[in-house]
Amino acid sequence: LAAAILLIVSGCAATKPMPARQPLSDGERLYRANCRACHTLRNPASYTDEQWPPLVQRYGDRIHLSSESRQKIVDYLLSAN
């Protein structure tokens, strides 16, 4: 029994702490805030670098996003892709 407890305790002590999360970029923050309003957020890898810009343009027009906001979202999606 003591050996089992020692094994469990030593296994817990060996885990590494989670790395600190980097602050969200403006593009990621805009993506999360605006795109989530209508649907589930897509993984940036869901579309290619060529597919993201026209998608952001089309849906950004629908919700009246500024061109600056759309560009920040595209930059985020391409960097995370």
Image: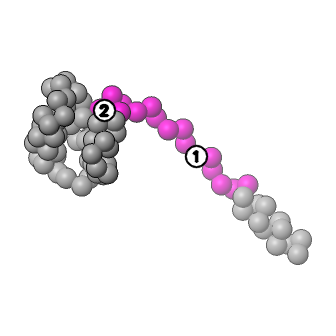
Viewer-side residue, 36 vs 7:
36
- Measured from the top left, where is residue 36 in percent x and y? 32, 43
Could you say where residue 80 lies in the image, as x and y percent from the top left? Answer: 30, 43
Spatial CA span between label 2 and label 1: 25 Å
Q: Residues within 10 Å of mark 2 (few under 14, many from 20)?
A: some
Q: Main secondary structure of the magenta part?
A: loop
Along the line of sight, the residue nearer the viewer: 46 or 5: 46
Question: Where residue 37 sits: x, y (%)?
Answer: 31, 42
- Report the amino acid beneath label 1: Met
Number of numbered labels in the structure image: 2
Residue at 14%, 44% (x, y): give it. 55
Circle 2 sits on which residue?
A: 30
Can you name the residue that lies furthest to the bottom here?
A: 1
Residue occupying the point 31% across, 32% down? 30
Q: Is residue 18 magenta?
A: yes
**Is 1 or 60 nearer to us in this picture?**
60
Helix, strand or loop for disc 1: loop
Horizontally, residue 47 falls left or right of residue 42, namely left
Image quadrant occupied by the N terminus: bottom right
State the residue position of label 1. 18
Q: Which residues are magenta?
A: 13-30
Residue drawn at x 17%, y 29% is: 64
